[in-house]
Amino acid sequence: MLPGLRDDDIPDKIRAVRGLFGFAALAGVLVALLLLPAAFTAGVSTRDAAGWFEDVPDGVDTSGVPERSTILAADGSSIATFYYQNRIDVRMDQIAPVARQAVLAIEDSRFYQHGALDSKGTLRALISNLGHGEVTQGGSGITQQYVKNLLLTQATTATQRKGATELSAGRKMRELRYAVALEKRYSKDEILRRYLNIAYFGDGAYGIEAAARHYFSKTAAKLTLPEAALLAGVVRYPYAYDPVNHPDVARQRRDVVLARMAALGWIPQATADAAAKQPVQLHVHQARNGCVSSGAPFFCDYVQREILTNSAFGKTKADREKLLKQGGLTIRTTLNWKVQKAAQRAVDRHVPPKNSAHKAAAEALVEPGTGAIRGMAVDRDLGPDNKRGKTWINFAADADHGSSIGMQSGSTFKVFTLAAALELDMPFGAMMNAPTSFTPTGYRNCDGKRVGDPNASLRNSADGEGGKQFSLVTGTWHSVNTFFLGLEKEVGLCETVQMAEKLGMRQANGKPLEEYPSFTLGFNPVSPLRLASAYATFAARGRYCRPVAIASVTDTNGKPMKVPTAGCKQVIDKGVADAVNYVLRGVLTKGTAAGSGIGRPAAGKTGTVDNFSAAWFAGYTPDLASAVWVGDPRGGYRYPMDDLCMNGECYGEVFGATIPAPIWQDTMSEALDGTSETDFHGPPSHYFSMGDGEVDPSKKDKKDKKDKKGDKKKGGGDTPPTTPPTLAPSPGP
């Protein structure tokens, strides 16, 4: 029986006894192997037999072992770790000398004096272990133990795992063969370093660095004598001597190591005695694995999916998953913690994770001009969807990065019609009639086919206006559906679609945008991330960048790997983007989102989907762009927000300015607090050829009546710059 084990440790007793007798039997085999190559290779020349031992067999990879990968924020702080085995490979100088001594003392004290097989050590260990009634000293040398661990680590089938652990002469001979070859290939220091990095130290800690961090919350370089002796004692039977689950047995084993170090003369006896009197003091730290416990779970999940789906990280998904969980990667991302925390607080504040109405909110934030994703928040914890307040679906991202099929974008899509009109040099003051209803006919898609429905009658939403004329500016400020349907018909449906595509828009399921007259009203399902990236293009004066989350990746050796780039390029003229910014700034001061400013130059657009099934706000400054969605994951049309009460607060009908805009406002105010203010560029002068377009429609009607009275005397009136179009609504502002 192993001293100190309780009755409930019977499996460990059996393992120890079996190991003791198995060791006795195999010791004789190993000693007999000393007679090789002559006896073992009867009929084979001595030179050939020696070659058989010294050549590393095919299929044995000594290049490395599974290491955990780390995802870092832009500032270098940790977001998450991924691993198959929790291991951190370190150099020899990163391991405390006392830790090396402790392991050598109990496992292979003559490591630096013998070759692959230590006959004296084997016989000595056999006598010692039989005398103590337990395995107190190792029989296999460090090199052989390294080989055993290497084969076990690389085993991918049950047969391979059995072959790496079975108590048999065949396994020992195979290990010895590898050990002889490795002793020829590597220095003793390198073999010891590799062993210390591969050995299992119990409780999920692989390698001495991970073990030091796990048990003592420190690095291996800072291990003290008692700590080093404790870890060295665990290696022989990591399940039986695990100090977390078997503290008393682990302490006894530690003291055996200390006594051995003193017997070898490596430490004074008094030092060993003093260390043995100290209690086992653990400061256990559990290494997190995956995104669930991350401080930015949905951003983390986005990065993980980027690696698992991008061929830049491997030919197959299995290759990419192996790289992530075993490759020891250092993945530096674009995440800004200040932005991330601001977004998370804002979505949780306005749409609490376990709110009574079961609504959800998501926000994505992108840096204009770089495509860097600075934040990504969902008002849920990452986890099973059947648990309240949790979801596996990343509502902020596309399907390939979050399983979301997207949400209808509402009037946030009107900006693409606006940009298409401005690209045709339509002035701010250009006026267009916005009827109360609109029949969508006379449109052609990009294939030249007629699209539309002569039987449909599209109208303005509740917070839009109709039955009067609007300028390009006021029609946008008031988000008038029939105005934009007419404008889209004027500039061309295809031109509007192409503008959206130039700015990176596609459906969240990866398919191209569908082309129908109500395109400008936002029926296409998209993600907040894509919408934020499109709006960031205006902030960057027409320079579009694909959204990117990964800044750099290095492998376990520090070698840089190829990563996806933003592919930034100028897609619209700077003047067009400046003109869009000019118009959208007024939305925050005189339009549907009036009062949602953040105390610095900003622009944006509200979006309300049909029947109040969802609401959006997309806005930006020259330094940061964001898109916010609020809706119901169960289905917006089935559970609309037309009479919403949530956690004791009632909103009535929810528009883009009701909840999404305040989320955006809170996020941006906090995220940009303390940063220098950047202003937009003014638009080119030719856009003012018909005035600034800021005349309020109601005031203009009164002015027109006065002008008409005067014009009767003068002989004529002004002709509107465009003929009144036929229009069509659906979503609203």
Image: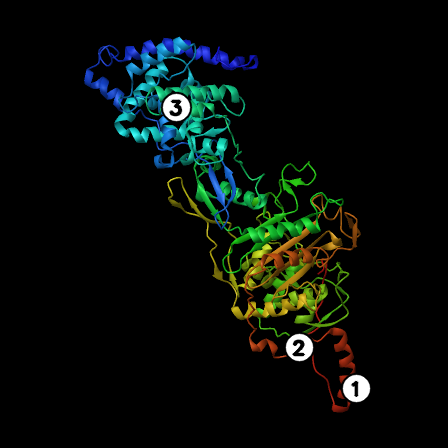
Q: Cα distance, mark 1 to mark 2?
A: 21 Å
Disc 2 versus disc 3: nearer the observer = 3
Q: Amino acid at mark 2?
A: Pro
450 with respect to 730 (left or right)? left
For the residues labelled 2 and 3, say whether their Cβ atoms are less than 8 Å apart.
no
Please state the horizontal and vertical placement of residue 696, each as a whole percent of the image: 73, 74
> Of the numbered discs in the image, which one, if any, rests on residue 392?
none
Q: Position of residue 268 (x, y in %)?
A: 35, 24
User: Relative to residue 704, is residue 253 depicted above or below?
Assistant: above
Residue 19: x and y in percent read: 43, 13
Tell me, yes or no, if residue 486 can be seen here.
no
Give the camera-side residue of 716 and 109: 109
Question: Can the viewer see residue 127?
Answer: yes
Between disc 1 and disc 3, whose residue precedes? Answer: 3
Q: Which residue is mark 1?
A: 709
Question: Circle 3 sits on which residue?
Answer: 270
x, y percent for residue 449: 62, 59
Q: CA distance from mark 1 to mark 3?
A: 112 Å
Q: Which residue is mark 2?
A: 721
Q: Residue at x 53, y 32 (%)?
A: 284
Q: Amino acid at mark 3?
A: Ala
Q: Up-down: is 120 above or below 351?
A: above
> Dot 1: what SS?
helix
